[in-house]
Image (cartoon, rainbow, N blue to C red):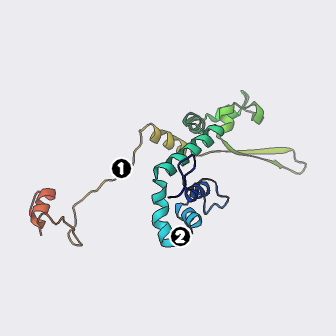
């Protein structure tokens, strides 16, 4: 039996985990199949089946979750911070960019929440002697931010509706322990062929 480290991982599992979470190659990082191929020297077919399966191994899953949580804490990534950021975009009042006279505030004087909603500021000089400035302000997607918040608050859900009647034709797979008539009766309340 292969020796296990303090995390309960075999040497190959440790390599798999390290590649999965921190490979410098973006086509490998987060790709269970590619990581499994590299760590175990496995074939394409074997890695396709075993890479995702290895992610469900309790030691691997716990190790990856612990590392992800530590990285999130170090980067100060919390649900509260993410929600604050999305809310700043969703609830932006464009008036926060301007002083009471309608003049654009310098960025350092804008409220922090307004700055967080800024995607870009473009200042262009116009005229022969550059006497006029044109400023274009672009914000992050307000609608998308509102949708994210609504989904978080369970105010918006994806629904799939089926209208009309069920068409006949095609292939019907019924369980082997009931007859087709019995299955149709159970599911549609009538005997149909």
Q: Residues within 10 Å of mark 1 (few under 14, many from 20)?
A: few
- Front residue (pair 171, 16): 16
Residue farthest to the right, as pictured: 129
In the image, 164: left or right of 22? left
User: Which of the 4 image quarters holds residue 38?
Assistant: bottom right
Q: Residues within 10 Å of mark 2 (few under 14, many from 20)?
A: some
Residue 109 appears at what percent x and percent y? 76, 30
- Front residue (pair 100, 165): 165
Marks 2,1: beta carbons within 8 A: no
Residue farthest to the top, as pictured: 100
Number of numbered tags placed on the structure image:
2
Gap in Å between the C-alphas at discs 2 and 1? 41 Å
The residue shown at (50%, 43%) is 148
> Which residue is labeled 1 in the image?
159
Residue 110 appears at what percent x and percent y? 72, 32
- Front residue (pair 104, 24): 24
Asked if residue 124 is positioned above or below residue 150 in the image, the reply reads below
Residue 140 appears at what percent x and percent y? 62, 45
Task: Classify mark 1: helix, strand or loop.
Answer: loop
The quadrant in which the C terminus is found is bottom left
Residue 98 appears at what percent x and percent y? 71, 32
> Which residue is labeled 2 in the image?
42
- Mark sitting on residue 192: none
The residue shown at (89%, 51%) is 128
The residue shown at (47%, 39%) is 152
Task: Classify mark 2: helix, strand or loop.
Answer: loop
For the question of whether residue 87 can be seen, the reply is: yes
């Amino acid at each position: 039996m292969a020796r296990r480290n303090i995390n309960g991982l075999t040497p190959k599992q440790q390599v798999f985990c390290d590649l999965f979470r921190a490979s410098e190659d973006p086509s490998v990082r987060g790709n269970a199949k590619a990581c499994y191929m590299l760590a175990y020297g496995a074939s394409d077919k074997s890695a396709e089946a075993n890479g995702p399966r290895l992610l469900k191994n309790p030691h691997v899953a716990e190790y990856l979750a612990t590392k992800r949580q530590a990285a999130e804490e170090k980067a100060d990534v919390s649900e509260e911070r993410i929600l604050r950021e999305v809310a700043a975009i969703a609830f932006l009042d464009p008036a926060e960019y301007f002083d009471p006279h309608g003049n654009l505030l310098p960025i350092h004087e804008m409220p922090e929440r307004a700055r967080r909603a800024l995607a870009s500021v473009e200042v262009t000089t116009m005229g022969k002697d550059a006497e006029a400035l044109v400023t274009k302000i672009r914000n992050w997607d307000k609608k998308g931010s509102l949708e994210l918040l609504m989904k978080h608050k369970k105010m918006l859900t994806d629904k799939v509706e089926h209208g009309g009647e069920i068409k006949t034709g095609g292939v019907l797979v019924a369980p082997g322990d009931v007859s087709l008539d019995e299955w149709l009766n159970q599911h549609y309340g009538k005997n149909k062929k």
